[in-house]
Image (cartoon, rainbow, N blue to C red):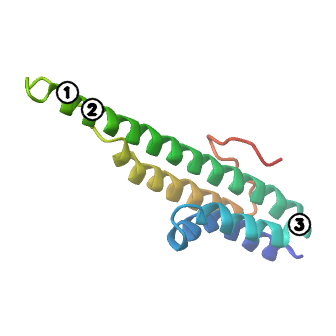
Amino acid sequence: MDQKEERNWGTYVHLGGILGTIIIPTVGNIVLVLVLWLIKRNESKFVDEQGKEAINFQITISLVGAALSIIGNITSGLWSLSHIFWHSRGDYFDFSWGWHSLHPILWVINIIFSIIAAVKANEGISYKYPFNLRLVK
């Protein structure tokens, strides 16, 4: 694999998270990056390295999104319970400030860092995401 093709595939794996999320919103970011990485990981050390970095970032983003959903569902349930028990007195707790509203921010973070990584990979520079669980080694 020549250097230009390596840089292109490095770019593709980083952008795969964005495209995958558009295609299959729940797990597409992980699936598409994983498929792209598995196709070319044995042909290039650079693509292997960038693929691992991209898959780890997409797993991190997905885990944070799942945590936000769980916390949001718990707080919505607490708000519902407090509303039932204390509504008659008018002094119920408001737990529903909106953990679910953080999902768009997470999406924007994914877009920004994936584009930065793709640009760096296209320049032939290895990119390390600033926050990343290094699960795939």
The residue singled out by tag 3 in the image is 44
Report the residue at 26% width, 37% height from top.
Answer: 80
Report the residue at 79% width, 75% height from top.
Answer: 4
- Closer to the camera in the image, 101 or 19: 101
- Could you tell me how far apart the alpha carbons at marks 1 and 2 are, in whole angstroms? 6 Å
The residue singled out by tag 2 in the image is 81
Q: Tell which tag, 2 or 3, sits nearer the viewer.
A: 2
The residue singled out by tag 1 in the image is 85
CB contact under 8 Å: marks 2 and 3: no
- Could you tell me how far apart the alpha carbons at marks 2 and 3 are, in whole angstroms? 55 Å
Q: 10 Å neighbourhood of mark 3: few (<14), some, or many (≥20)?
A: some
Q: Quadrant of residue 124?
A: bottom right
Q: Is residue 99 above or below residue 32?
A: above
Amino acid type at image mark 1: Phe
Tally of numbered tags: 3
Left or right: 59 as drawn, with respect to 113: right
Q: 10 Å neighbourhood of mark 2: few (<14), some, or many (≥20)?
A: some
Extreme residue toward the left, this view = 89
Q: 10 Å neighbourhood of mark 1: few (<14), some, or many (≥20)?
A: some
Left or right: 59 as drawn, with respect to 38: left
Using the rendered image of the protein, determine whether residue 119 is visible from the camera's viewpoint: no
Q: Position of residue 59 (x, y in %)?
A: 65, 51
Report the residue at 74% width, 57% height from top.
Answer: 125
Amino acid type at image mark 3: Ser
Q: Position of residue 123 (x, y in %)?
A: 70, 64
Q: Position of residue 97 (x, y in %)?
A: 27, 37
